[in-house]
Amino acid sequence: MTTTNKCSALQDVVAYVDVWSSDKTANYSKPFVQQLQEMGAQVSKTFSKQVTHVVFNNGHPATWRNAKKSGVRLVSVLWVGRCYDDGVCVDEDLYPAFNDESNPLLKNKKHRCMQPKDSPERTPENDRRMRKKLDKLMKDLAPKQPLVTDVSPIFIDEENGIVYSPALKRSDYMAQRLKDMKEKRENLSLTASQMVESCSPTGLKPSLGSTPPVFKLMCRGNAHTAAAVLTEIPSEGEEENHNKQVSLSLQNMVNKTKAMRTLVMTSMPTEKQHTLAQVVTALGGFSIVDRVCESTTHVVSGGQRRTLNILLGIARGCWILSFEWILWCLEQRQWIPEEPYELSDQFPAAQICRLQRHLSAGEHQQDLFQGQPAMFVSHHSQPPTQSLVELIQLCGGTVCKTVRQAGICIGKYSGRRPEGSRILSEQWVLDSITHLKRLSYDNYDLS
């Protein structure tokens, strides 16, 4: 029987399916609903006047009574299977349904499905109650008065002239962990903000997780002080004695950090963009920009697509987060730890690059393409040439302006080129960054 005939075998049937396990704890209706629909039948979610057939097995007593009263066809699941196999509507009388009430233990037992519900994830877009709750939270926010005070994980000892970070106590340990992650691709255990919290006896918490821009700023401003960061870490009694003395300087540093930190949103519909902008305005600590740049620390994605901003964020060691992070920050009315919302399954390199950025005292630089031949990017490449050049350079690669100097040409190129050079698809660059691994040329060779 052809597929075309099977699709119209039950086109005149309106079915209601009530199929359960013998102990009435598992609803088995779904596969039979699918088979009926594949044969052209309409399947009603309720027992209505339009129903012509009831597929019944250990179902609800009310379904049996209504079907008998209405005179519709009561058939067993065997009838559905036979119709599906033969591709025609077979005689219903050959496969009648039975209502087994002989077992006194099951006669009055209520149907109670123990299976997990197969329902879509609740989001503000498809759930009215969540949408109302979100709107109420947005109204309650006071944009002009941030609801959380941003506290930097950098401390200043003015008396001894030392700048230090509690997180550096674990720098050796985290560096070893980074090495292990590159080999095993395991998940990280702590967020940067949690590391600071666990090391800080005073309990000060940075509200925005890792704050490498502050550390970078201090290292650029004073190389001697940066060396002191790595060698001199005061005891707990000294974090406590100077807290009052440095409060003003600390606040000035925090204000400077806020002006530096930027956030980028990608793959996000207008409604989510509006929500994110309102949260950032209310909680402070970020400015929103269109493209990942040196000051960007967070990239928030409304989906799981690999975009140019996602790849730039990976290359620069940014947090790559789902939109759920924004919703929970709104719920808590403060910036919360980022790691539970990191898109590490979709972009496995994101965690490693972020940790590398956190551990780097100075300018962050990936080494993914170090040691590779000089690359020339075709003017007809996709993504655009300048974007690919930026990605390659951020990952330690060398880019030349003419093909004569190149050992690798990225993107389609039909002109003359040096002997022995290779032409690779742009996907080689994008995939290598996504997995933080120099992939084989063979699958991307355009020569």
Image: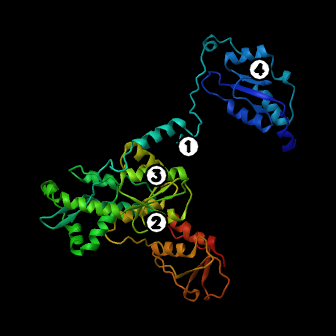
- Residue under the image location 84 percent in, 31 percent down: 12
Position of 305 with respect to 356 (left or right) is right
| Residue behind mark 4 | 97
Tag of residue 292: 2
Question: First in sequence: mark 3 or mark 2?
Answer: 3
**Residue 96 at x, y = what percent?**
80, 20
Question: First in sequence: mark 1 or mark 3?
Answer: 1
Question: First in sequence: mark 1 or mark 2?
Answer: 1
Question: First in sequence: mark 4 or mark 3?
Answer: 4
**Residue 423 at x, y = what percent?**
62, 79
| Residue behind mark 3 | 276
Label 4 CA crowd tier, 10 Å (few <14, some 14–19, many 20+): many
Residue 437 in sight from this viewpoint: yes
Label 2 CA crowd tier, 10 Å (few <14, some 14–19, many 20+): many
Residue type, numbered disc 1: Glu
**For numbered disc 2, what is the local secondary structure?**
loop
Residue type, numbered disc 3: Leu
